[in-house]
Image (cartoon, rainbow, N blue to C red):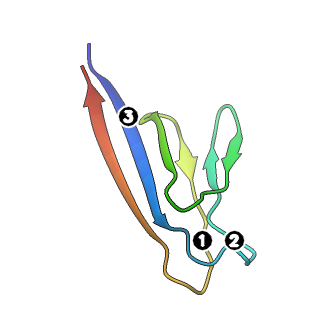
Amino acid sequence: IRHKYALVYYLDTGDQQCEHPGILRLHSPEKQIMPQKGMIVIIPADRIHSVIYGGSKTRLMIGINFYAF
């Protein structure tokens, strides 16, 4: 059985001193994660998630989807 996951690796979180600092929001159930440099987050790929980032600095992250067998 294959399970699909989403991974986010935060290389640089950018400007978090703003109205929309890039909080990762997971839905159903609701959870908020404030990213930190070097943080890795892995969630089931079918879990609805969203981010709003409004900082003035560039934010750098790597996002991938993968399967576990």
The residue that label 1 is drawn on is: 53
Three-letter code, disc 2: His
Q: Quadrant of the N terminus?
A: top left
Locate residue 29, reporting x and y percent. Answer: 68, 31
Using a 10 Å C-alpha cutoff, classify the residue at mark 3 as few (fewer than 14 neighbours), some (14 to 19) or many (20 or more): some
Front residue of this view, candidates 30 and 21: 21
Locate residue 37, reporting x and y percent. Answer: 54, 62
Closer to the N terminus: mark 3 or mark 1? 3
Three-letter code, disc 1: Tyr
Closer to the N terminus: mark 2 or mark 1? 2
Residue at the spot 50% in from the left edge and 44% down from the top edge: 41
The residue that label 3 is drawn on is: 5
The residue that label 2 is drawn on is: 20
- Judged from this view, the residue extending furthest toward the top is 1
Closer to the N terminus: mark 3 or mark 2? 3
Three-letter code, disc 3: Tyr
Residue at the spot 60% in from the left edge and 57% down from the top edge: 35
Front residue of this view, candidates 43 and 13: 13
